[in-house]
Image (cartoon, rainbow, N blue to C red):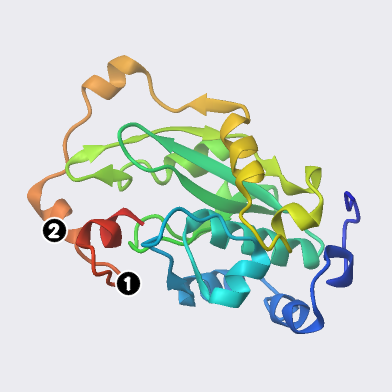
């Protein structure tokens, strides 16, 4: 069943009391950001996952979209819409953030193993501006790979059991986000003339928060 309330309770979302207390304690976007960054990284070493909010709270680890789902649920419990934005890349992994507004401007809550693709203060006048704030550091080795972004994707179009309390994986939600309208950030001609990142910039990408037994995975997430 869809939940349309502007300010739902944890019970409205099907959360257990202890789950609700954790999320309700995250009373601001900054506190939500601190919580998701503190979660261990989910390197998917046993196979692809797309865990629900409940799954993230259970395993205490997440990759970007799993953390974004949790952030969106926490925002919703504070009376804000649960919105995601998908960032698409060429020859690289996509990235998903939870977005919110303050004083008419957009900000983002984001989990990444790198420092570059995390929190954004709510100072961006449009989602395009917000997406472009990730452009220079969104890279695969020397290549800048960010190419597009979605509209704000409202999770209220799904019942909470699809993404908040689902005990399986939320593939349906992920597929719908992939299929949502996206907008190109640069033209093909601009892409051909992008300057590569220099050796110093590439070395900076070696700074990561969580180590994996597979170095490739540690730098991918």
Q: Is residue 81 visible?
A: no
Q: Toward which corner of the image does residue 72 lie, by quadrant?
A: bottom right
- Mark 2 surroundings within 10 Å by alpha-carbon count, few (fewer than 14), some (14 through 19), many (20 or more): few
Tag of residue 147:
none
Residue 58 pos. (x, y %): 60, 76
Question: With respect to residue 186, does 155 lie above or below?
Answer: below
Q: Nearer the viewer, residue 10 or 47?
A: 47
- Figure quadrant of the C terminus: bottom left
Residue 11 pos. (x, y %): 88, 71
- Mark 1 surroundings within 10 Å by alpha-carbon count, few (fewer than 14), some (14 through 19), many (20 or more): some
Label 1 or label 2, whichever comes before in sequence order: 2
Q: Residue at x 68, y 63 (%)?
A: 167
Q: Is residue 27 visible?
A: yes
> Which element is circle 1 on?
loop
Residue 188 pos. (x, y %): 33, 17
Q: Nearer the viewer, residue 168 or 202?
A: 168
Q: Residue at x 43, y 42 (%)?
A: 94
Tag of residue 203:
2
Question: With respect to residue 43, does 199 lie above or below?
Answer: above
Residue 53 pos. (x, y %): 66, 65
Q: Toward which corner of the image does residue 14 lie, by quadrant?
A: bottom right
- Asked whether, in this view, residue 184 is left or right of residue 127, the answer is left
> Which element is circle 2 on?
helix
Q: Nearer the viewer, mark 1 or mark 2?
A: 1
User: Mark 1 = which residue?
Assistant: 209
Q: Residue at x 62, y 74 (%)?
A: 57
Most distant residue in the top direction? 189
């Amino acid at each position: 069943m869809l939940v349309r309330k502007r300010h739902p309770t944890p019970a409205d979302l099907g959360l257990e009391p202890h789950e609700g207390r954790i999320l309700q304690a995250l009373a601001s976007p900054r506190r939500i950001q601190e919580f998701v960054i503190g979660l261990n990284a989910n390197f998917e070493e046993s196979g692809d996952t797309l865990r629900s909010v409940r799954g993230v709270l259970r395993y205490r680890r997440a990759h970007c979209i799993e953390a974004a789902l949790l952030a969106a649920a926490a925002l919703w419990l504070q009376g804000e819409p649960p919105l995601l934005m998908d960032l698409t890349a060429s020859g690289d992994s996509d990235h998903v953030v939870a977005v919110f507004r303050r004083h008419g401007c957009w900000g983002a809550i984001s989990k990444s193993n790198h420092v570059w693709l995390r929190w954004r203060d709510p100072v961006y006048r449009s989602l395009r501006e917000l997406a472009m704030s990730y452009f220079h550091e969104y890279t695969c080795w020397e290549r800048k790979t960010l190419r597009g972004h979605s509209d704000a994707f409202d999770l209220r179009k799904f019942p909470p059991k699809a993404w908040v309390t689902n005990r399986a994986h939320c593939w349906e939600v992920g597929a719908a986000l992939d299929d949502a309208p996206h907008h190109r950030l640069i033209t093909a001609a601009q892409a051909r003339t992008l300057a590569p990142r220099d050796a110093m910039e590439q070395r900076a990408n070696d700074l990561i928060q969580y180590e994996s037994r597979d170095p490739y995975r540690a730098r991918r997430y």
